[in-house]
Image (cartoon, rainbow, N blue to C red):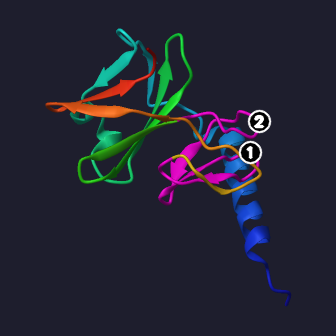
Amino acid sequence: MTETTRREFVTASVLATAGLCLGGLGCDKPATSGVTPTDGVLTLDPASHPELGAAGGSLALDVEGGDPILLVHVEGERYVALARKCTHVGCKVVFEGGEVVCPCHGSRFATDGSVLEGPAKLPLTNYPISRKGNLIEIRVGS
């Protein structure tokens, strides 16, 4: 029996996930689409999105006139908004196991957008978030 290296295991896992996504199981299906910013700000109520109800939940946003965003409920009242396009070749990233993962080539990112493992070398854009009562505001433009 041969021993599998961590890199081989991660590569096989990512390829299997990518195969499931390509097979139509919906890894690339945004939970919300057509979100339109007002004055460069996206505003949404996390209570209206069950995907964000618990820490570890995420919501893919297709921003009208802008780049796609991944909103992640990190813990407690802390959320992060990251670019949803991998900086390696532009595949749409997903949130799983506490990390942002690119299903195309296996890049992994921390919830602050920094690269944990390549091939991506540049971090994901981390969009500023603020709270206004129960609402989340994501600054996507000037």
Q: Is residue 9 above or below residue 47?
A: below
Disc 2 from disc 1: Cα separation: 9 Å
Tell me the element at label 1. Answer: loop
Comes first in the chain, label 2 or label 1: 2
Please check the rendered image and state whether residue 102 is part of the magenta-colored stretch, yes or no. yes
* Residue 34 forms part of the magenta stretch: no
Alpha-carbon neighbours of circle 2 within 10 Å: few (<14), some, or many (≥20)? few
The residue lying at 39 percent from left, 53 percent from top is 56
Q: Residues within 10 Å of mark 1 (few under 14, many from 20)?
A: some
The spot of residue 98 in percent (x, y) is: 47, 58
Q: Find disc 2 in the rendering and name its residue.
A: 89
Left or right relative to 140: residue 108: right
- Residue 96 lies, with reference to residue 123, above or below; the image says below
Name which residue type carries label 1: Cys
Nearer the observer, disc 2 or disc 1?
A: 2
Determine whether label 2 and label 1 are within 8 Å by CB.
yes
Three-letter amino acid code of the residue under disc 2: Val
Residue 5 coordinates in the image, percent (x, y): 78, 77
Name the mark on residue 104.
Answer: 1
Residue at 72 percent across and 53 percent down: it is: 106
Left or right of residue 74, residue 111 in this image: right
What segment carries the magenta color? 83-112
Q: Disc count in the image?
A: 2
